[in-house]
Image (cartoon, rainbow, N blue to C red):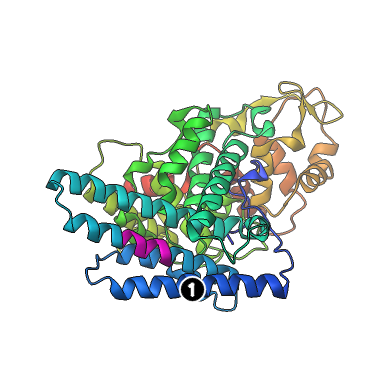
Amino acid sequence: MASSTSLISGLSDSTSAIPLTCPAVSKSHMKMWQDFASRIRLQSTSRYRDLEWKTKFEWCHKQYSVLKCEEADPWHQLLHELCDYFYIEAQEKMKDLAESKKTIEQKAIESCQVMKGLKSTLGRILFVADYFSPHFQQIIFAIDLETVKPERVLCYLNQYFHEKINFLIRRSIPLSESVTSFPIQDLRSIARVQACFIIAQYLLTSKGTINRGIVPDLQQALKNSSLDQNSFPNLNRISSDWQMAIEHVKVPNDPYGYAAVMIRADLGVKWKESITLRHCQIEMLSAMLYISSDPHRNPTEELMIFRDYWNLIKDECLSNSVKSACLHRGIQDDKLKESISIDQSGLVEKYKQPFWKCPQLIAACRQMGCDDINQVKDQIESSEGYKNRDPSELLSWNTLIEFACQNFSSERNAILQLGRYGFSLTHHRLVVARQNLSNC
C-alpha cells in the first residue's frame, strides 16, 4: 500500500493514498480463490508450453512479478495468475499475427494494439492491487469463481478501475477550499505542483516501479476532470529511462539534513516520521513530471537533470566537487512579508478567515514541529508577541511564524528558517534546489 502521508503541506488530505482495512476473509473464500488461481495457472502453463514461438516481454513480466512475492496472500496470488493468463494470451496473439498473411504494415499496427492492450491490463490490475484490493474483493465475493472465466473477472476489474481512477482525480486534483480561501500565492502555480505530486503517487507502485500501463487512463481521467489542462504534466514523456532514474534514488545519508528537510516540506512528512524510500521516489518522480512540460528538452539533457536530482536527494550535491552548502539557500517568497490585519478573534481581515486555517502558515509550522491546526493556533496565541500586540497593528505572515517560534527554547533561528522554508506552496523544492546549485 502506498504511503498515507499528505503529499503537499497544508493541502487537502485527499492527496493521500486511501487507508484501507482488509475485510475478514473466510476459509471458503480463500479456498475458492486458490482453486480459481490454480485453474488459471494450469491453463496458462499448458498454453505457454504449447507456444513454440515466444516474444520477449521481460518488462511486462517484471512489472507484475512483484505480486508473486505475496506468497501467503491468496488474493495477490490470484491477481498474479490473472496477469500470467493475459500475458500468455498476448503472446499467442503475437504468434498468430506473425504467421498470418497480413501485410507488414497491418502486422505492425495490430502488434502495437496487442502490446498496448497488455500494458493497460497489467497496469490496471497492479493499480487495483495497490489501492483497492479489499474493496475489489467485495465484488469478487459475488462472482461464482467455479464457472467464471478470467475475461469476466477482467471485465469487472476494468469497470471498477475506471470508476475509481476518475473518482480519485475528481477528488484529489482540485485545490482544497482552504487553499482557495487564502489566495496568498499564485493558485495556478500551486495547482501545477500539487498535480505533479498526486500523479506521481498514483503512477508509482508500492514496489517502486512506474506503472506506465495506466498512463492513457490517467490522461483520459485528467481530460474528463474539466480542470485547467495546463496544470498537468506531459505524461507522454515517460519512458524506460524514467524507471532507471527511479531505481537510482536512495534515502538521504543525513536523516535531518537539507535533503530530508526538502522532502518533508514538499510531502508534508511530520518530523516524528522517518523519510522512507517511497517518499524519496515520489519526490523524484514528481520533479521529473514537473519539468516534463518543456518540449525543447532532449532525452540526453533530461537524463542529466535526473542524475542531478537523485544525487541531491542522497548526497545533497550535484557531484563531489560541488559544496552542499549551496543547497541551504531557501525559497524566496515575497508573500511572507504581506501586510495583514488580524482582529482580536484571529480573523484575517483580507481573507475573512482565521489565521490558523492558512495552509501556507500550517505548512510553515509543520516544518517547525506543529502538526495540526490546533497546534498552530495554540503555539501562536500563547506567544508573548501575539498576546501583547496591538490589534490595530499590521502584521505579516513572517511575523506569525516568528510568534510560533518564540516558545522554542533552543536553536530558535534554525527552526525559524525551517518555517520560512516551508511557507511556499508554489515551488517544487527539488527543482529549485538544482536551479540554485546550477547558478553557484
Q: Amino acid at mark 1?
A: Lys
Viewer-side residue, 375 vs 17? 17
Give x and y (percent) for residue 228. Answer: 49, 27
Question: What residue do we see at 64% from left, 75% from top?
Answer: 31
Where is residue 343, by image quadrant?
A: top right
Give x and y (percent) for residue 30. Answer: 65, 73
Per the image, is 86 magenta?
Answer: yes
Viewer-side residue, 359 vs 407? 359
Give x and y (percent) for residue 40. Answer: 47, 69
Magenta residues (range) = 84-91
Per the image, is 420 magenta?
Answer: no
Q: Is residue 60 left or right of residue 226?
A: left
Question: What residue do we see at 40% from left, 61% from top?
Answer: 86
Viewer-side residue, 117 vs 397? 117
Q: Is residue 89 visible?
A: yes
Viewer-side residue, 168 vs 407? 168
Residue 257 to residue 364: above or below? below
Question: What residue do we see at 60% from left, 59% from top?
Answer: 3
Overall secondary structure of the magenta stretch? Answer: helix
Residue 83 to residue 100: above or below? below
Identify the residue at the far front of this view: 147
Residue 171 to residue 434: above or below? above
* SS at badge 1: helix
Q: Is residue 253 visible?
A: no
The image shows a total of numbered marks equal to 1
Residue 300 to residue 345: above or below? below
Q: Which residue is mark 1?
A: 68
* Crowd around label 1: few <14 · some 14–19 · many ≥20 (10 Å): some
Q: Quadrant of the N terminus?
A: bottom right
Q: Is residue 93 left or right of residue 288?
A: left
Give x and y (percent) for residue 190. Answer: 54, 34
Where is residue 65, by image quadrant?
A: bottom left
